[in-house]
């Protein structure tokens, strides 16, 4: 595992280097990247365009910051799509995962899963969440994928995982933490 001394966007290029090394090592053919405004998604799409991968860039839902607002500019979305990426804008399942918890544990605590994942770092939580979102929308297959996310802006976390749809949260498997901040 690559450990970054501190979280944040200053790790984006190194996280993408770690992603590419993991792609070469594992043979995984799907990648999901968290990118609210599109910068991290564009950096990944530009680096990965020639690889012929399934690349899904996941954004916040419409209205996340203010009613009706989309945080990713339309021209950024167009550029991502021209580079072969699929862009998914949808609801973050860890905000409403109570059903899965209730079915498995017999109780519900709205933020239990998100807060538990944050023990490992914000980027780990986001990697799991964007994999769930991409699976929910049918943009990835159930095969292993690499997820890229960060703490705030940029990328500082890369995780190899087996995705699952949010109603099957407990079928998602974290296979390897490729890179993450050590101090978060």
Image (tube, rainbow, N blue to C red):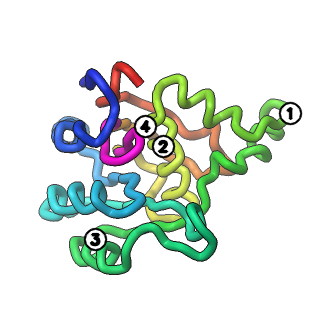
The quadrant of the image that shows the C terminus is: top left
Q: Which mark is residue 107?
A: 1
CA distance separating discs 3 and 4: 22 Å
**What residue sits right under mark 4 in the picture?**
123
| Image location (x, y in percent) of residue 12 | 24, 43
Magenta stretch bounds:
148-157
Q: Which mark is residue 19?
A: none
Q: Nearer the viewer, residue 3 or 104?
A: 3
CA distance separating discs 4 and 2: 5 Å
Q: Is residue 9 left or right of residue 166?
A: left
Q: Is residue 15 left or right of residue 131?
A: left
CA distance separating discs 1 and 3: 40 Å
Judging from the image, what secondary structure is the residue with disc 3 in?
Answer: helix
- The quarter holding residue 139 reads bottom left
CA distance separating discs 2 and 1: 23 Å
**What residue sits right under mark 3 in the picture?**
80
- Total numbered circles: 4
Q: Is residue 121 above or below residue 170?
A: above
CA distance separating discs 1 and 4: 26 Å
Q: Which secondary structure class fits the magenta region best?
A: loop
The quadrant of the image that shows the N terminus is: top left
| Image location (x, y in percent) of residue 21 | 17, 37
**What residue sits right under mark 2 in the picture?**
126
- The quarter holding residue 112 reads top right
């Amino acid at each position: 595992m690559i450990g970054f001394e501190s979280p944040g966007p200053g790790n984006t290029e190194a996280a993408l280097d770690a992603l590419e090394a993991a792609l070469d090592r594992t043979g995984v053919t799907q990648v999901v990247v968290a990118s609210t405004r599109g910068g991290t998604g564009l950096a990944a799409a530009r680096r990965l365009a020639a690889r012929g991968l399934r690349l899904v860039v996941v954004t916040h839902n419409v209205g996340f910051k203010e009613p009706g607002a989309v945080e990713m500019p339309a021209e950024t979305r167009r550029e991502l799509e021209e580079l072969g990426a699929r862009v998914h804008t949808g609801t973050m399942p860890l905000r409403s995962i109570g059903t899965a918890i209730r079915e498995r544990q017999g109780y519900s605590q709205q933020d239990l899963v998100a807060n538990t994942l944050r023990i490992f770092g914000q980027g780990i939580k986001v990697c799991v969440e964007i994999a769930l979102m991409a699976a929910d929308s049918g943009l990835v297959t159930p095969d292993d994928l690499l997820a890229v996310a960060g703490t705030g802006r940029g990328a500082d976390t890369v995780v190899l995982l087996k995705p699952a749809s949010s109603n099957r949260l407990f079928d998602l498997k974290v296979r390897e933490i490729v890179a993450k901040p050590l101090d978060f």
